[in-house]
Image: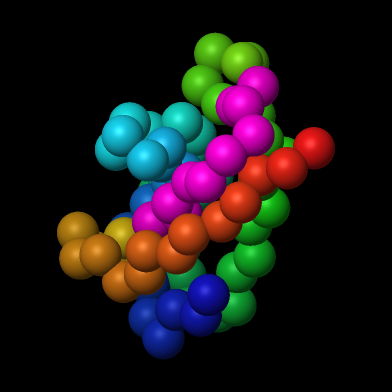
Amino acid sequence: FVLNEASSVTLSVYDMRGQRVATLMQGSYGEGFYEAAWNGGGHGGKTAPDGIYLIRLTVNDKMIANEKVVLIR
């Protein structure tokens, strides 16, 4: 994703029940291009099971993107 100005960002992974599985990025980020990768890990070091997940990008407390991904190992 690209930020046009310094912003507060949260990039999280949710399961289909709406429960947060992992937080990939959280905090203040300057203007620029950012990438993130999810290896299937979750909070507490647990590995998420195969399935469909939502990746949600929130910038300055506004949801910007909500994309479905499939985790298959």
What range of the chain is rendered magenta?
47-56
Tell me where residue 28 sits by quadrant. Answer: bottom left
Q: Which residue corresponds to the image point at 37% horizontal and 40% vertical from the top-left?
A: 16
Is 23 magenta? The answer is no
In this view of the protein, which residue sits in the foreground, 65 or 59? 65
Find the residue positioned furthest to the bottom.
4
Tell me residue 59's x, y (percent): 30, 65
Q: Is residue 28 above or below residue 47?
A: below
Q: Which residue corresponds to the image point at 73% horizontal and 42% vertical from the top-left?
A: 72
Q: Is residue 45 visible?
A: yes
Tell me residue 33's x, y (percent): 60, 77
Q: Is residue 71 above or below residue 68?
A: above
In what quadrant of the picture does the C terminus appear? Answer: top right
Q: Which residue corresponds to the image point at 31% horizontal and 71% vertical from the top-left?
A: 64
Q: Is residue 11 visible?
A: no
Is 51 magenta? The answer is yes
In this picture, residue 57 sits left or right of residue 35: left
Count of numbered circles in the view: 0
In this view of the protein, which residue sits in the foreground, 8 or 54? 54
Q: Is residue 5 above or below residue 12?
A: below
In this view of the protein, which residue sits in the foreground, 3 or 73? 73
Tell me where residue 61 sits by quadrant. Answer: bottom left
Find the residue positioned furthest to the right.
73
Which of the colour schemes (rainbow, by chain, secondary structure, one colour) is used?
A: rainbow
Q: Which residue corresponds to the image point at 60% horizontal and 69% vertical from the top-left?
A: 34
In this view of the protein, which residue sits in the foreground, 17 or 60? 17
Q: Main secondary structure of the magenta part?
A: strand
Tell me residue 43's x, y (percent): 51, 21
